Image (cartoon, grey):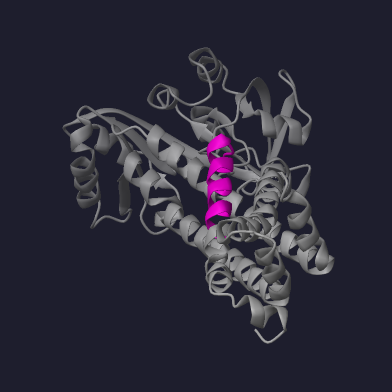
């Protein structure tokens, strides 16, 4: 603590430079916190993925497929259970309020038993064709509660010519990290029977469980080969592969790591430049401290502390801002935004603090070497 007045004086020497450095570090650590938090979310999603689940969907687009594809898949050896689902897209009230429902059949809740809805809530959708389950974010967005009517204006007309789909909210459930922006789940049979006759018997995705998780990849390849030359080629991916490779086949973890490293590189360059200039401007002062008995270790500690203080303060503020952004972004981003929100925990803050310390140490290496070789007489005379 006896060195604190010296550290504070050094930081106050150029208040504008110190303030800009702190703000730059804060912005960089906000980005760093968001990337590390997103990586933590993706790790959680990958860890939670079930090795016995396989997702089958159209290979080239998301156009509807005949439901007979699901029946053919169900007959393959090694398949335990299959489920079909479709997407009902539209808007609520205003065309700008885009929304959509996942219309699932009776087996969907049994295959995805680890999702937020409880078995009793899945049963509500099975037994009441107009019942839907919505997440808390969706309920808050549209100011809905259990028992309310939820009306979706569809992009395509129903069999009776209307475009309005009226549902009854049967349950409000917690959010799931793997589904960003909330979710709505309805009854596939109700959706299918309400469509025009030409559009009935179609679905967007087949989800299945295999008897042996070790055979999931092989079964997926067998499904793809079965429909390779048909009018509806499919892509069949084990859930663990999909979760590990990221959304849309993109390795989100690799991208977040690179962006986080780029942010740290920016902080290192900025901090090293500022500390080097600060030390160069105060060489006579450091020479005076040496004549007063300060050791090289003491001067090293002063320089490191001068670099570490704005880095650590910026790291804490940056991660705090990133945490607040994750609470705000779900209400700003569109409901169909693909990526999940970052997850924040003590681990993310620890990574930020450790990175700030590492940057502070790395940025002071050259100034410390210069001080260790400082010629006191030359510095005091202003010739260094």
For image coordinates 43% across by 22% down, the residue present is: 113
Residue 110 left/right relative to 272: left
Q: Quadrant of the N terminus?
A: top right
Q: Is residue 313 above or below residue 17?
A: above
Query: For residue 15, which quarter of the picture?
Result: bottom right
Magenta part of the protein: which range? 343-359
Q: Is residue 287 above or below residue 308?
A: below
Depth check, front residue: 125 or 184: 184
Residue 145 visible to the viewer: yes
Residue 344 lies in the magenta-colored region: yes
For image coordinates 73% across by 56% down, the residue present is: 7
Q: Main secondary structure of the magenta part?
A: helix
Percent across and percent down for residue 347 are 53, 38
Q: Is residue 228 above or below residue 152?
A: below
Query: For residue 180, which quarter of the picture?
Result: top right
Residue 188 lies in the magenta-colored region: no
How many discs mark residues in the rendered view? 0
Residue 201 visible to the viewer: no
């Amino acid at each position: 603590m006896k060195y604190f007045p010296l550290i504070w004086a050094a930081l106050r020497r150029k208040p504008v430079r110190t303030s800009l450095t702190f703000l730059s570090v804060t912005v960089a650590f906000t980005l760093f916190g968001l990337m590390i938090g997103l990586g933590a979310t993706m790790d959680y999603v990958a860890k939670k993925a079930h090795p016995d689940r396989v997702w089958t969907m159209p290979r080239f687009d998301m156009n509807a497929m005949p439901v007979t594809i699901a029946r053919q898949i169900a007959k393959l050896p090694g398949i335990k259970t299959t489920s079909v689902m479709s997407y009902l897209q539209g808007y609520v009230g205003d065309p700008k309020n885009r929304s959509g429902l996942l219309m699932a059949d009776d087996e969907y809740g049994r295959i995805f038993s680890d999702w937020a809805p409880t078995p009793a809530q899945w049963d509500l959708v099975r037994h009441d064709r107009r019942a839907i389950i919505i997440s808390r974010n969706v309920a808050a967005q549209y100011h809905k509660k259990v028992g309310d009517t939820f009306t979706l204006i569809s992009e395509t007309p129903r069999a009776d010519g209307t475009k309005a789909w009226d549902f009854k909210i049967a349950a409000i459930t917690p959010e799931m990290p793997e589904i960003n922006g909330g979710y709505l789940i309805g009854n596939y049979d109700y959706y299918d029977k309400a469509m025009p006759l030409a559009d009935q018997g179609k679905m967007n995705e087949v989800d299945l469980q295999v008897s042996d998780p070790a055979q999931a990849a092989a079964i997926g390849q067998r499904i793809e080969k079965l429909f390779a030359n048909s009018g509806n080629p499919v892509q069949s991916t084990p859930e663990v592969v999909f979760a590990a490779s990221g959304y849309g086949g993109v390795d989100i973890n690799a991208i977040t790591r690179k962006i986080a490293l780029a942010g740290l590189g920016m902080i290192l360059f900025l901090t090293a430049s500022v500390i080097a200039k600060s030390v160069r401007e105060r060489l006579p002062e450091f020479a005076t401290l040496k004549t007063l008995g300060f050791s090289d270790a003491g001067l090293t500690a002063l320089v490191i502390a001068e670099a570490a203080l704005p880095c650590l303060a910026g790291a804490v503020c940056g991660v705090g801002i990133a945490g607040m952004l994750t609470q705000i972004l779900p209400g700003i981003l569109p409901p169909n935004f693909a990526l999940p929100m970052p997850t924040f925990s003590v681990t993310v803050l620890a990574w930020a603090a450790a990175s700030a310390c590492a940057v502070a140490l790395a940025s002071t290496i050259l100034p410390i070497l210069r001080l260790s070789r400082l010629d006191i007489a030359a510095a005091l005379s202003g010739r260094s």
